[in-house]
Image: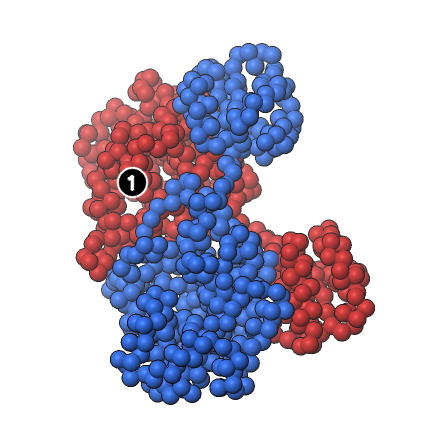
Chain colours: A blue, B red
Amino acid sequence: MRDFLPEQAKKKQFIEDFLRRIFERYGYEPIQTPIVEEFELLSAKGSGGEAIKEEIYYFKDKSDRELGLRYDLTVPLARIVASNPAMLKPFKRYCIGQVYRYDKPQARRYREFTQADVDIVGAKSVLADFESIQIAIDVMRGLGLDFAIKINNRQVLEELAKKCGVPDDKIKECFRAIDKMDKIGKNEVVKELKAKGIPEKIMHEIETNSFERVKDIIGETEGMKNLERLLELSKESNYKEVIFDISLARGLEYYTGNVFEISIRDGPSVGGGGRYDKLIEVYGGLPTPAVGISFGVDRLYDALASTLTIEQEADIFVAAFSEKDENALLSFSSSLRKIGVGVEIDLIGRNIRKNVEYASKKGLRFFAVIGENETKSGKIKIKGLKNNVEKEFEIKDLKGIAEFIKNEK
Amino acid sequence: MRDFLPEQAKKKQFIEDFLRRIFERYGYEPIQTPIVEEFELLSAKGSGGEAIKEEIYYFKDKSDRELGLRYDLTVPLARIVASNPAMLKPFKRYCIGQVYRYDKPQARRYREFTQADVDIVGAKSVLADFESIQIAIDVMRGLGLDFAIKINNRQVLEELAKKCGVPDDKIKECFRAIDKMDKIGKNEVVKELKAKGIPEKIMHEIETNSFERVKDIIGETEGMKNLERLLELSKESNYKEVIFDISLARGLEYYTGNVFEISIRDGPSVGGGGRYDKLIEVYGGLPTPAVGISFGVDRLYDALASTLTIEQEADIFVAAFSEKDENALLSFSSSLRKIGVGVEIDLIGRNIRKNVEYASKKGLRFFAVIGENETKSGKIKIKGLKNNVEKEFEIKDLKGIAEFIKNEK
């Protein structure tokens, strides 16, 4: 787990605000759910499963209730939808919040991290899947990142596995092995498949990665149609970043249809998602189709931290010449804030040189001192800290000062 | 713990955004720290103390490390300041995040709640205390709430207790009893004081609540000067909501000087704070003065939920006339979003009546359908959902459509 100090927190916040704006532009609305959930919920069969205990923060409270910290934002969403059957559909929600995994710490992996999820509940059309892709494109292009979005379909992968002679009871293991391709490499995956008695033919098809070939092998199935339509829509929108990848399995068990994964070009995965039409039922809800995509805010932060610069929110630093000018300082600074100017004042009574140093380090753009001269003459000088501008104003001319600060860079 | 569904989450988010804007206007910068902290940190002497274990979520992780969920945002701040001695001072940070208390559930009290804190570290001037008050005034007036801010000083209260004959070793107990005044009433507090062998005289002074009288009794002490200056500054700024209250003790042990509490008029406390000049040392830092104020976002939400209305972020709902018009729908909606219009599209293929019903329920303001007629003629009708306006545009005239949506209410 890590702290975000101001320089970092401002960048992280910028990314979160940016995501929010895009989500809202598509008609998604926020929800917030607790970080602590019942363990029973987190470990439900068809969702996390009992095995999840090893991967999460699990504990009992003082009345011996089994609890855990949420490991994603999808399970709480499914709980809410299941327990509110009358909810207006499609339910389009976004959620930005911390989730927890008790992994062995690795480089660029954190035990506490922030996810930003958008999901559509109650729409089975591929248009809904495509909206996840549209949003991913808007986010990644908007943030100026070089990226790719891999697309596949769980049904298609399963059908292909069957056609390649993978026995039904080994399909899950087969996916889990294939899913490790990026991490452990092809040779290790082949070894693992062999050890598990899974025919190597599936590896051959995966290596070939030809959409037409896969289509020939399995035919016009429902999964195939959904995958094909998603690729078609991406092509029509000129989304060159979207690529078919038959090896994409996505670890989570609850996916049922199209799946996607966003990666920085030659870099890590920064998000992914897919269709999960059975998960709401796991939590006692009616059969309800659902699809969504999740962005790893920490991964995006890591990709952007070194290049992103955020403007300081306060615009001007104002100091009193001496202690008896404090009232004048307070009155001037409050009046400026009232018309929307960000003002930081000297709270320490330092000399001008030290104040200028502090204000410059903090990235403020303007500086002023208020003392006896100023209150007597009714005039104050506003100085630029990033350049050498200096202009005198009537203290009462707040609008003029605000204009100047806004326009002069 | 509670869920915030969209209608609620949008209001909560509005309040958080509003707080953030005010904090930033005063030159505060964000930080984010983990929700899980070492138990040793949370239970340090002079901070939470060992007894805190009963009041928080405490657990051990798989390697038997003692952990807890943070119960406030001040302790993590103190940790950060203590471990970064080179930090630019004054360090002005804000933090908005969830904290956890394992209380018995009560009405209007939650085990998970959101706090929004502003703190100044490294400034001992009363100007810094006053900035907490200024921010509280801006927040509460800005949210349109009827409120009062009680002010007192821990040193003054301690000195008064001593003058009233309260023995040194009973001062803490005495404060704790007085702090319950609002909850259990005067009679119960007097009973408790008697039972503890604390002289009743202190109760008499508290009831009288006269600043001049207290000043006469204890004289011009440092605490008195700080309190007096804070009241003076409030008066000069015409803050009629600020009132002296000698009974205000504030439970937390770490306060050392001026303390404040914000309450809704005839309602609950929605925040508070004060000066804590010793806390950074508790965490191994250099002696560093600090002061801040904390807003209970859930309390503010409860006070505002019934009156606040938030506009829907997406502006227009667009549906395809039939499945073969989907591409035209996607192209039109994407183009509008690119120039900043919020667009939600039909993802279900419903009929027009049902789509209008859905869009109206969700609070969208405009509606349009795109089909063969529209693509052939190159024209589309934009209809108002909140009134009867209707206007036809060239499909290509995106700017005209955006203008219309922006200006027509």
Viewer-nearest residue: B129 or A92: A92
Which residue is at 61% across, 30% downward? A408
Q: Residue at x 52, y 18 (%)?
A: A370
Is residue B148 in view from this perspective?
no
Res. A178 in view: yes
State whether residue A340 is above or below residue B343. Answer: above
- As displayed, is residue B335 above or below residue A219? above
B15 is higher (above) or lower (below) than B244: below
According to the image, label 1 marks what residue? Answer: B79
**Residue A268's spot in the image, x, y percent?**
41, 59
Label 1 SS: helix
Q: Is residue B118 left or right of residue B191?
A: right
| Quadrant where the image shows the C terminus of chain A | top right
Residue B185 at x, y = what percent? 35, 42
Chain hosting mark 1: B
Q: Quadrant of residue A187?
A: bottom left
Q: Amino acid at mark 1?
A: Arg
Residue B229 image position (x, y, % from top left)? 42, 22
Comparing B157 with A95, the one in front is A95
Residue occupying the point 38% across, 55% down:
A113
Q: Position of residue B171 (x, y in %)?
A: 23, 33
